[in-house]
Image: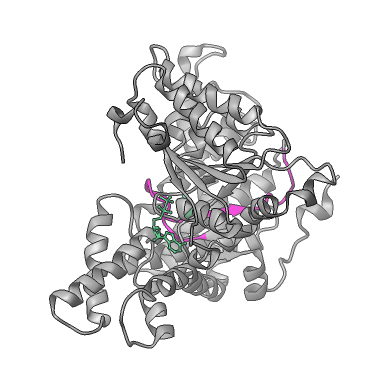
């Protein structure tokens, strides 16, 4: 790898250039959805005529987003390997420390080489280092060098002809900060997101990497066991763990790698990971599963709450333990009636209530839920005129704005007590339901523990169809 001193000496070595890549999709385990999406590029690179003769505008590029080590680079390389085309790559972070004017000229070179060697794939890793949204940059003006590098990338993307068989892929773990200009049609207009692997995904990734080492354990048993022991691991952590286990075994002079070596390796990898991101202990995982199952059961049985689309207990870094997506029960709602508000609040309390019903103690994990519930109840009382005691008055939250008269001490007390009354009511509604559906919570939580991700079909399978019509059935 040549550093900045190599610049100007050897044009060819300013970026990585690999031909004859042996990596195939079979080396990329899990992430089936991402593979399906990226297949479109493989077809294009292998059979461009199929697209051109129909006049189809072929996709130019895709952003691959996901946490570090989840296989973005690997997938990009496998795409080149499957298509049998060369792979040019560069990392966005390398541009950051460069001399003025070097960034744009390096981008020009990279793309010129791509065109010359087409069909091919260009991969720009860590594109957020260059492509951070201009509005999200620090005060005091942006970084001119970065901005001109970004502009050069956009110019190059726009300059392709439909006949140029160059696919540009970019990796990032911060898709949220990217400049929207990158995502315009004809640029990186595909977005492929790659999550940390599920239990099943980890099993498959272990299977890929275990082929490289000598072990005579039963593969089915071994991969299942290892996957269960490594929630939160990304593909890179798994590769690391397998290699580490082989090192441990070698140190002992063993002639094959066995379970105890893997166990030591896992501990070591977790030790390194804990500093970086969340890895849940088994007890925490259980708590998160029952917490999320509580929300999901509420969404299923409260008519005006939102039924579940997908729930996951794979940690996503930055403190988010579980995560769930819900289908808004009433479509895109602009107006919420009292029933809807109450059902939503009750559902939001479902996480904590489920913890209460299943464990001896409760955790700090519901704090964000309480924040939401409190804000909803406060809005009902102070903005929506839904508390008989406070009446139809809009109470300004921020007294400094002075849009309306600030309220008296006694009104403040009334607001507090009304908010409390409403939240308690939602709590009771939730607790009544979940007490009755305790068995169902268990079903969902245990399934979540074993599969880590559940979708709507899983809920239908476990609970039967939702007893209420869904949004599409009463959409206007
Ligand atoms: P990223 O680009 O997302 O940071 P990489 O593609 O560099 O991650 O992954 C690093 C290594 O981890 C890969 O070279 C591979 O050994 C391993 N790895 C990651 N994901 C997978 C996967 N899905 N299947 C097999 N190996 C994987
Ligand atoms: N705050 C999210 C939830 O409780 C994780 O579902
Ligand atoms: Zn919650």
Magenta run includes residue 210: no
Please name whichever residue, 444 or 13, is drawn nearer the observer in this view of the structure: 13
Regarding residue 360, the answer to whether it shows in the image is no
Rendered image coloring scheme: one colour
Work out whether 2 lies above or below 181. below
Q: Quadrant of the N terminus?
A: top left
Estimate the x, y position of residue 226 in percent, counting from the top left: 36, 75
Q: Position of residue 370 (x, y in %)?
A: 45, 46
Magenta-colored span: 312-333
Q: Is residue 54 left or right of residue 135?
A: right
Which quadrant of the rendered structure holds the C terminus? top right
Residue 308 figure quarter:
bottom right
| Residue depicted at 56% across the width and 12% down the height | 403
| Residue 168 visible within the image | yes
Residue sitting at 35 percent across and 68 percent down? 230
Residue 332 is covered by the magenta coloring: yes
Q: Main secondary structure of the magenta part?
A: loop
User: Which is more toward the observer, 300 or 472?
Assistant: 472
User: Between residues 58 and 162, which one lies in front from this camera angle?
Assistant: 162
Q: Position of residue 345 (x, y in %)?
A: 57, 48
Residue extending farthest left:
252
Camera-side residue of 180 and 217: 217
Q: Quadrant of residue 12?
A: top left
Q: Residue at x 48, y 66 (%)?
A: 27
């Amino acid at each position: 790898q040549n550093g900045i001193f190599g610049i100007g000496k050897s044009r060819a070595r300013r970026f990585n250039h690999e031909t004859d890549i042996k990596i195939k999709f079979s080396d990329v385990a899990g992430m089936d959805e991402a593979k399906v999406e990226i297949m479109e590029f493989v077809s294009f690179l292998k059979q461009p005529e199929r697209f051109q003769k129909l006049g189809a505008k072929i996709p130019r590029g895709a952003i691959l987003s996901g946490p570090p080590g989840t296989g973005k680079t690997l997938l990009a390389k496998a795409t080149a390997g499957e298509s049998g085309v060369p792979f040019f790559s560069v990392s966005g972070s390398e541009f950051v420390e460069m001399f003025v004017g070097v960034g744009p000229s390096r981008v020009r070179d990279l793309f010129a080489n791509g065109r010359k060697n087409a069909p091919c794939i260009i991969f720009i890793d860590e594109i957020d280092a260059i492509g951070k949204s201009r509005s999200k940059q620090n005060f005091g003006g942006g970084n001119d060098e970065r901005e001109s590098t970004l502009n050069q990338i956009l110019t190059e993307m726009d300059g392709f002809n439909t006949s140029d068989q160059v696919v540009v892929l970019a990796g990032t773990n911060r898709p949220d900060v990217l400049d929207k200009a990158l995502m315009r049609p004809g640029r990186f207009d595909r977005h492929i997101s790659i999550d940390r692997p599920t239990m099943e995904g980890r099993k498959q990734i272990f299977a890929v990497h275990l082929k490289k080492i000598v072990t005579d354990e039963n593969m089915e048993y071994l991969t299942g066991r290892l996957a269960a022991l490594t929630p939160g691991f990304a593909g890179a952590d798994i590769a690391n763990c397998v290699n580490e286990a082989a090192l441990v075994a070698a140190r002992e002079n063993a002639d094959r790698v066995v379970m105890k070596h893997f166990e030591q390796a896992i501990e070591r990898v977790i030790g390194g990971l804990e500093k970086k991101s969340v890895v849940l202990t088994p007890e925490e995982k259980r708590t998160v599963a029952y917490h999320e199952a509580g929300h999901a059961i509420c969404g299923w049985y409260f008519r005006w709450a939102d039924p579940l689309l997908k729930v996951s207990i794979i940690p996503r870094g930055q403190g988010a333990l579980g995560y769930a997506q819900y289908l808004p029960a009433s479509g895109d709602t602009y107006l919420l009636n009292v029933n809807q508000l109450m059902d939503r609040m009750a559902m939001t309390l479902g996480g904590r209530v489920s913890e209460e019903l299943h464990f001896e103690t409760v955790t700090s994990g519901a704090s964000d839920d309480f924040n939401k519930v409190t804000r909803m109840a406060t809005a009902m009382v102070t903005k929506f005129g839904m508390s008989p005691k406070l009446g139809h008055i809009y109470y300004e939250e921020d007294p400094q704005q002075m849009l309306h008269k600030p309220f008296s001490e006694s009104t403040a007390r009334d607001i507090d007590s009304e908010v409390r009354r409403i939240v308690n009511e939602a709590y009771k509604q939730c607790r009544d339901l979940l007490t009755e559906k305790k068995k169902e919570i268990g079903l969902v939580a245990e399934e979540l523990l074993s599969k880590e991700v559940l979708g709507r079909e899983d809920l239908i399978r476990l609970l039967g169809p939702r007893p209420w019509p869904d949004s599409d059935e009463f959409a206007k």
